[in-house]
Amino acid sequence: MTIRYKLTIAYDGTKFHGFQKQKQLRTVEGVLEKAISRIANGEEIKVFASGRTDAGVHALAQVVHFDYPRFIPADSMMRAINTLMPLDVLVKKSEIVDENFHARFNVKKKTYMYRVDLGHYTDPFKRFYTGHYPYPLDVDKIKIAIKDLIGEHDFTSFAAAGGVIENKVRTIYSATVEYNKENNELVFEFTGNGFLYNMVRILVATLLEIGNGRRDVHDFLRLYEVKDRQEARGTAQASGLYLKEVFY
Amino acid sequence: MTIRYKLTIAYDGTKFHGFQKQKQLRTVEGVLEKAISRIANGEEIKVFASGRTDAGVHALAQVVHFDYPRFIPADSMMRAINTLMPLDVLVKKSEIVDENFHARFNVKKKTYMYRVDLGHYTDPFKRFYTGHYPYPLDVDKIKIAIKDLIGEHDFTSFAAAGGVIENKVRTIYSATVEYNKENNELVFEFTGNGFLYNMVRILVATLLEIGNGRRDVHDFLRLYEVKDRQEARGTAQASGLYLKEVFY
């Protein structure tokens, strides 16, 4: 009998080559499985995440699950893992869940945040934590355009090559943008039932082009129709993207 | 005839192997000289800094100078360098100075800042930007102890091995500590006429040990006398250290 653990983890993606394990490269999955396997006296433990994140992408609350061969109280498991992991990744919450819980297949909603630095130059200390857009922007246009994302749409135009999923219809429950005057940043938030590969970064790039006047304010309506990735050309930088919450 | 330029630069030290050029490694000096040499059509240009910073140490305002073979307006030089450099380093100010200016030899004072995260766990997003001290601290004791730093003292006990400087007497003009409640951090600032190798990080480690009750509150007075590096054992992490200002 094994015990299933659900972990909520945060990580600074700067020094990771993404979430997914790769030989010889430092990844979040790699350091996490290494820590858990050490606790299990070397037995290999496989971790399942709500989804991957790319190199440089951050997580405020990624969710993973794994099966462990013995009972350990959830809090002790969290402390043990945190003791063994590098400090740019942190288990924030640990729960024992029943065997029907699956970190990926049971996801109901996800929220992503995207930070855009609008400064003329990139602040070196924001380089790894924001995207950068030093061009003129009409935020009101973005606020109008972003409403066209709400609802169920075919996001074929917003799916990067490399995805393997056939059905590209997704539902966006909420999509907002706020201008933060204090640090001269735009902060986007998107909540939906699922996101295609690179979809958030492509949505942000398209919204910025609308704000810059290079696209019609209702260009999303056309892009849903044409179903052509070539039409939504840009992809915002990985460094501005944060997986903020996963809902089950 | 060459023109001497003085640059004030900021960098996030996270992805640099320190300031000083090293073969095959990414350093601040390396990317800076590469950018300037490209502007000079490949002619090798040597940069002189106010001092080195170690791997992981940050700078809000490092100062460097270099001699360039032709006149270019100071602002154009800054823009050209910033265009060619990676975004985790930024030239903030560019001035043409006379040939007697030397970024290292003319330094009158330097200010360093050190950030200490007091959280129980390290926030992953602070990992590369603070030191971490999750133990009990009496900040009032640190505030008393830090006053013993002001003035001229022999800092032999606070100089890491590897330094080559014989005279270890330095003058500290100001030394402060503030508790920042909002982010649960201690922020130290030290201004002096010079700092020995690793000296700020050793001072911070010693101050934290005093705050933790593991040293007498006036232990600095003893440490000045014994002149023994073995007595001031700790060295705070590089990640919390910022070169904040250089005065000429």
Image (spheres, coloured by chain):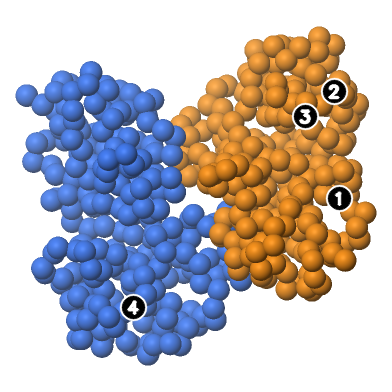
Chain colours: A blue, B orange
| Cα gap from disc 4 to disc 1, whole angstroms | 48 Å
The residue lying toward the viewer, choosing from B132 and B57, is: B57
User: Are discs 1 and 2 located on one and the same chain?
Assistant: yes
Q: Is residue A93 left or right of residue B223?
A: left
Instruction: Please report the residue visible at 32 percent of the width from the left and 87 percent of the height from the top.
Output: A219
Residue lying farthest to the front in this orientation = B43
Q: Which mark is residue A151?
A: none
Tell me the amino acid under the disc marked 1. Answer: His
Q: Residue at x 74, y 26 (%)?
A: B163
**Left or right: A49 in relation to B114:** left
Name the chain under label 4.
A
Q: In the image, residue B34 lies at what x, y percent? A: 62, 58
Where does label 3 land, which residue? B196
Residue at numbered disc 2: B166
Q: Amino acid at mark 2?
A: Glu
Which of the numbered marks, if any, corresponds to residue B102?
1
* Circles 3 and 1 in contact, beta carbons < 8 Å: no
Above or below for B195 versus B211: below
Which sits earlier in the primary sequence, circle 3 or circle 1? 1
Q: Dots 1 and 2: beta carbons under 8 Å? A: no
Q: Secondary structure at mark 4?
A: loop
Q: Secondary structure at mark 1?
A: loop
Lower position in the chain sequence, tag 1 or tag 2:
1
Judge whether A191 appears above or below B27 on screen: below
Q: Are marks 4 and 1 in contact (CB under 8 Å)?
A: no
User: Dot 4 surroundings within 10 Å: few (below 14), some, or many (20 or more)?
Assistant: few
Label 4 to label 3, Cα distance in Å?
52 Å
Name the one closer to the observer, B129 or B230. Answer: B230
Q: Residue at x 19, y 81 (%)?
A: A227
